[in-house]
Image: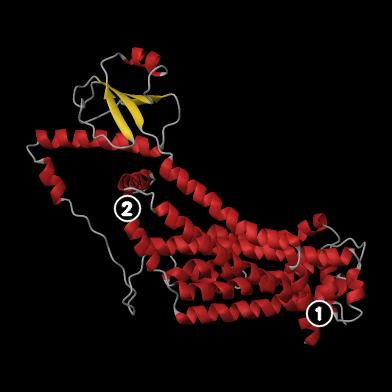
Amino acid sequence: MNKILLVTAREYLTRVRKKSFLIITIATPIALVLIFGLFGYLAVNSADTKVIQVIDESGRFTKTFKESDRVHYLYISNTLDDAKKNLEESDADGILYIPAIDIDKPEGIKYYTSGSPSMSTIRSIERNIEQVIEDVKLQQSGLDAELIRDLKPNVSLETFPLDEEKESNAAAAFGTGYALSLFTYFFIFLYGAQIMRGVMEEKTNRIVEVIISSVKPLQLLYGKILGVAAVGLTQFIIWIVLIVGLSSAGAALLGGQVSDEQKQQFEEVQAARPGGASGSAESLVELQSAIDSIDFTSLVGVFLFYFLGGYLLYGALFAAVGSAVDSDTDSQQFMLPITIPLILSVFALAFVLDDPDGTLAFWLSVFPFTSPVIMMARQPFGVPPWEMVLSMVMLIGGFVFTTWVASRIYRVGILMHGTKVNYKVLAKWFMQKQ
């Protein structure tokens, strides 16, 4: 045990003292915050007002469109051909052409522009046209348009777990589950590849032949896996602290620049998305309420368990691959079978997030090779305790199993050089007695 700890400490200190570790650990969260901050700043400050020339041959839409801070309508009497010729020389961004349409079948309305219009601009125009047509139809029917709008209900359903008073939010759970699942997938790949390359490097440099004169191959394997796990955990904690701190500071600076007009623009963008009818109803205040509905304390604990469990399970297999081959090229044939469950987990996320308590979600969150990704998708929605315990026990059992399989390959493969390795050779090493 002492030798495993010595190998773990050596692996940990060797990696954290590298300049590349320090640079990546500090630069990555700063770069992420700067990139997202830049996107947010440009989204808030770079929106231009679009000027749209309107040619209305129907006579129904003249000076009826609602102006906004993003779209300004300029009604002209030119023909469409003349307007097209003069568009480049004018300050307008596009031409909205409305022919003499049938109000019951509004076809032939076109928008001409020299560039690519944004979704929010297109949606703003469409809503204006729809609103005018709706008003005309209501007027022809003898109904009061304002009265009809007042009669439309606006229902926002609040959801609560049966045994809790705190409100849950499906949209926030969906986003959180999706993000954490991808993070888990990314970290398992990142640190699993580090283990494989570390083992491969020591093998090709013949350093391992010196090390195993003092420790057993299995002690070296366990120590290396735990050492890289400690490195990953250290890096992850530093990233979380830096990202949260920098994001909070950036949000405080950026938040003060968001005006009521820009909040309206945000809602228009949400409405312009496919299926965005519900999204348009979301306000920034509701977004904050959705974030508050997530239990981040339990979420962080579960994430650390599945991150470490998934890493240990796959890390052992990556180490076995690293011990069996002499180069990255040779490792590719063994990587695909190992990574297929992880890739399938990501593909299954859409189905799991749509029905987090379904049969598919249950079995994938219990199967050890997919549970690290799938359980993180389910956790924000709430998972029955017995399912969580079963999944954790299965993951621990999976780690013990993969470590046993990997150790039988590692003890032989780490000392082999120049051997053409295939699955038959791996099976032979696995069955070989001490």
Earlier residue among tags 2 and 1: 1
In this picture, residue 237 sits left or right of residue 283: right
Protein image colouring: secondary structure
In this picture, residue 73 sits left or right of residue 228: left
**Circle 2 sits in a helix, a strand or a loop, which is it?**
helix
**Mark drawn on residue 218:** 1
Picture layout, residue 238 above or below residue 113: below
Q: Amino acid at mark 2?
A: Ser
Q: Residue at x 32, y 72 (%)?
A: 160
**Circle 1 sits in a helix, a strand or a loop, which is it?**
helix
Please give the count of numbered marks on the rendered protein: 2
Picture layout, residue 175 above or below residue 427: above
Picture layout, residue 396 above or below residue 253: below
Across and down, in percent, residue 278 comes to 32, 52
Across and down, in percent, residue 336 comes to 71, 59
| Nearer-the-camera pick, 360 or 135 | 135
Across and down, in percent, residue 406 comes to 77, 74
Residue that label 2 marks: 278
The residue carrying pointer 2 sits among few (fewer than 14), some (14 to 19) or many (20 or more) residues within 10 Å by Cα, namely few
| Nearer-the-camera pick, 278 or 246 | 246
Q: Residue at x 34, y 16 (%)?
A: 83
In this picture, residue 372 sits left or right of residue 63: right
- The answer to whether residue 386 is visible is yes
Across and down, in percent, residue 23 comes to 69, 59
Q: Which quadrant of the figure contains the C terminus?
A: bottom right
Q: Quadrant of residue 328?
A: bottom right
Q: Amino acid at mark 1?
A: Leu
Q: Quadrant of residue 370?
A: bottom right
Q: Residue at x 54, y 63 (%)?
A: 181
Q: Which quadrant of the figure contains the N terminus?
A: bottom right
